[in-house]
Image: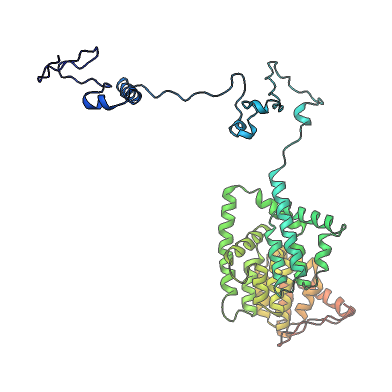
Amino acid sequence: MVDASPGAITDSKPGGVMSGELKPGVRHGAEAQTSSPKTASFVDAFHAGIAAGSKPAAAEDLRVPGKPPDISALMPWMDVDHDPATAAVPKRAPKPAASTTKPVAPTTGSITAASTAATPPDFADTLAAAKASAFNLELEVLRLSNDPKAKYKVQDVLERADDSLTRTKMKKQYAAANDGQTFETMIQSSKGLDERDKQHALGLMSDQRDATTDKIAALDPQARAKLEDEAAVWADKLLHITRSDDRDDSEHADQIANILGSRTPEELEVIRSRVRLQTSGTERTTTYEELDRTFTGRDKDIVLAGLTGSPTHLASTRLVDAAMEGDPARIHRIVKELKPEKLAELRTMNPMLLAQVASSMPAEHRAEIEAALGGAYLRQRERASRRSCSPWISPSPTRATPRRPSAC
């Protein structure tokens, strides 16, 4: 008999509850009577594990002793390690054991395995080849299209090829696909480009631009950041002029010339990139298109001369325009803005042009213009030019394009 009075609860089996105490992990009362042995043993083990602070048992290790782990074994149709039906399938060759001998340092002229092994492909070379292929495809589509803006889109493609390696790949790929025809020949024979477009496109693919972009790539981060900040200011000024009202005149052309004329090739390259960024999403995408569509006549000659990176070429273009307008004050201003060494270079390169500029001035201003441009040296060159042919520069209020005599 069992005494069921309070405080006298006992259990006839060992491990029972004594004096009304409940032990963890032991089932009591009706719950102990209704639970199956399997469930009870699991729950008891669970409670016992919690009480003891133990961790769940680790998962069974199914790896085959002596064999490296093979992720393909997770796929039943490739399980050559465990499936008897595929036991005849050849296993992968085991990895060779690591050598325990001390490596010998290579000597001069010796051939080692490292030197004869194939080098991995260069990522920069692979990327440049992919970009070159895409750019050449764009150019071919533009060449075959009837798009009226194709001439500007060609300039945009060539501007976006902004590293020398990509441009070199473009030339090589084009020659390989066109029986050795050069990239420059393709530009020269393009029917959709006028002479000015062709010269600008050739400049974008020139060796000079290669040297410029290589120099920019070699700049340290601080110098590159400074160059970018300055280019942003110049690009803002340029776009402010080209997007203003009544901008197609010599005054605005001279303002563009002042922005571009004194810039280095590296600065011009970054300005082009900055303008392309700031006009993204608009109908005009490049500096060339911005200037070509804003100005006309000789004013266009002036602003596009600013993109050549040659201060002397830009100055001579501006002087011709000022001479044809009969504007001595503007000539003085152009000469004053030109550095003395560049003026001396212009005298050496094209003295006859300067002499004709001076001779085209009204009589009351001719002496001062001669003095500003070169004095007695120019008078000597001007007399020589009169013996060979008549001056082709003459004041013209209509701003017509000057006619060059055939003798010159």
Direction bottom: furthest residue: 397
Residue under the image location 69 percent in, 76 percent down? 300
Q: In this view, does 34 lie to the left or right of 126?
A: left
Could you tell me if residue 157 is visible in this image?
Answer: yes
Question: Between 102 and 81, which is closer to the camera in this rendering?
Answer: 81
Question: Between 234 and 408, which is closer to the camera in this rendering?
Answer: 234
Quadrant where the C terminus is found in the figure: bottom right
Quadrant where the N terminus is found in the figure: top left
Q: In this view, does 394 lie to the left or right of 16?
A: right
Residue under the image location 64 percent in, 63 percent down? 272
Question: Between 112 and 62, which is closer to the camera in this rendering?
Answer: 62
Question: Between 293 and 386, which is closer to the camera in this rendering?
Answer: 293
Looking at the picture, does residue 253 appear above or below residue 286? Answer: below
Q: In this view, does 335 lie to the left or right of 391?
A: left
Looking at the picture, does residue 150 appear above or below residue 169? Answer: below
Residue under the image location 59 percent in, 61 percent down? 231
Q: Where's residue 284, x and y in %?
A: 63, 71
Looking at the picture, does residue 153 appear above or below residue 205? Answer: below
Looking at the picture, does residue 188 appear above or below residue 179? Answer: below
Q: Where's residue 221, x and y in %?
A: 58, 48
Q: Where's residue 201, x and y in %?
A: 75, 65
Residue under the image location 64 percent in, 33 percent down? 78
Q: Where's residue 343, x and y in %?
A: 72, 67
